[in-house]
Structure formats: C-alpha cells, structure tokens
Amino acid sequence: MTMVAPLQAEIGGSTRLFAIIGHPIAQVKSPQTFNPRIAAAGLDAVLVPIHVVPEKFDDTVRGLKAIANLDGIVITVPYKARILPFIDQVLPMAEAVGAANAMRREPDGRWSGDMFDGVGLMRGLREQGEDPRGRRVMLLGAGGAGSAVAVALAQAGAAAVTIHDVDAVKTQALVDRVKRAYPACDARAGAPDLDSHDTLINATPTGMAEGDPLPVSIERLRPEMLVVDIIMKPEVTAFLSAARQRGCKALPGKTMLEGQGVELMKFFHVEGRP
C-alpha cells in the first residue's frame, strides 16, 4: 500500500463527501486535483473514488443520492450518458452534449447536473494562451469526451469544427447537435484534413495503451498548428511527442483536467470559501 500525506488534518463526522464513480476507477486523477483545492478552500470535505460495476450502477447511484452528507458526484467513463435519468435538472451544456460528468445536491434536495469536459478544456486552452475563438479545429472522436469538446468549441466561438470518428452515425448525430445549439459554427463530419485546420484535438482513447498507433497521420502537421491530446496517461503520448518533434505546440490531457478542476469547484460551490 502506498502511503501519502493526508490532505485534511482530520476526517470526522462533519466531513462532507464528494464521490467520483466509474468503471474502472483506478486510473482517475481527479482526487489528486480536487482534494488539494478543497483543502485550500478550507472546506471540511473529501472527494473519494468509488468503483461502480455496470450491473450495479442503478442501485449504487440511488444509494449514493440517499447519503445525507454526500454533496456531489463526479461521473467518468462509461457512465456520462447513463447518469442522465438520475439528474432532476439537466443543465444546458449537459443537455446539448447528451451526457453529464458532475451532479450536485441542491438546497431543496434535488440534483442538478452538467458537463465540464469541454468547458474545462476551453479554460485550460485559454490559460495556455490559446483562445478557441475563431479557430478551425480538426476533432478526432465523437464519443462522450469528443461530444463535450465539440459543443464547447462551438460555444467558445470556434469558426469551424470538423469531426472524424469510425462510427459515422455517431459522428453525424454530434454534428447535428452542434449545429442546432450553435449554428454560427461550421460543424461538419469529415476525414482528417490538416491542411485547412489550425488546431488538431485527439479525443479518442488511441494512445492510452503502449503500442497504439497514432490516431492520425501527422505528415501534414505544420509547426504553427496547435495539437491537443486529452488522454491523461501517459501524460506525454506518442502523438504529442511526434507533434512536438514537428515544431507544434502540443498540450497534454492535464490541460483539460486542470481547467475542469476550476469549473467543477465553482459548480460544487467550493472555490473561494474561507
């Protein structure tokens, strides 16, 4: 067992709880990001990982919602869409994406939920000096994370988002959702095309496993292009390493994680507490 220094001086009967649920759960980095923020805010609370197996998902979520000192739940793969029926008020970004990755208990006992993957990445990009507004983005992946990123890019004022995924039906459905929510953004499905885009984002899991191929050929990458890979582990994927070798600014998954941490703490009413 790995020993680490405690984040709080003491966890007691008054400690408020936040949970992050997923399957698997060992890979999550959120506790390392959120718990220092919670401690710095002076809040007697802790975020803990909870492994929820698919066949017990419904029962587990109902049980978590019934815990009186549990104030919020962070949702990771594969449950971001499956969680929606358990949310009393689905907020606009989650509604546009069709998935949520956080829900909080409101004062009246109801639960509201929203999606922060995409807005977290937008915040992270801005903090790195890369404003999404006006960009022409080639986005790889139309899954849960890709959907959140696509909608957030359009919301942030991206000029165009071209989406590529092996599932053509899923890709077109995402394109249609982005167009309905943000018609000013030129959203379309298309094969990877680096010549007419200034930003390349990998929102697929390709690169997580050792020996994975690159998610797209990088032969036409230009040094002035911005490249982002939202994979958390490894921190520097083969894709990012190859992009940097070609002179590109290449940002890792922690860009999204850190930006999302700020947005989630605001959502949970934790950031800035005395």
Image: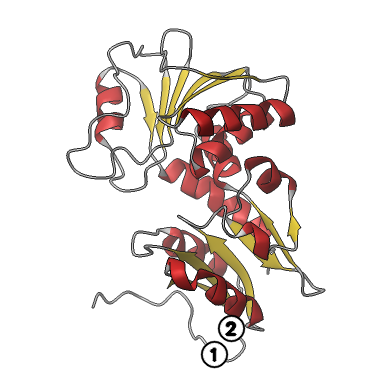
Which residue occupies the foreground of this view, 168 or 22?
Answer: 168
- Cβ atoms under marks 2 and 1 closer than 8 Å: yes
Picture layout, residue 253 above or below residue 41:
above
Q: Which mark is residue 15?
A: 2
Query: In what quadrant of the picture does the N terminus appear?
Result: bottom left
Among the 4 quarters of the image, the one containing residue 274: bottom right
Q: Residue furthest left?
A: 211
Mark 1: secondary structure: loop
> What residue is rendered at 32% in x and 29% in y?
215
Can residue 231 be seen here? The reply is yes
Give x and y (percent) for residue 75.
53, 60
> What residue is rendered at 48% in x and 82% in y?
9
| In the image: residue 156, left or right of residue 46 | right
Q: Which mark is residue 85?
A: none
Give x and y (percent) for residue 17.
57, 77
Can residue 156 be seen here? The reply is no
Mark 2: secondary structure: loop
Q: Residue furthest top?
A: 195
What amino acid is labelled 1 in the image? Gly
What amino acid is labelled 2 in the image? Thr
Other residues around mark 2 within 10 Å, as few (<14) / some (14–19) / many (≥20): some
Read off the residue under disc 1. Answer: 12
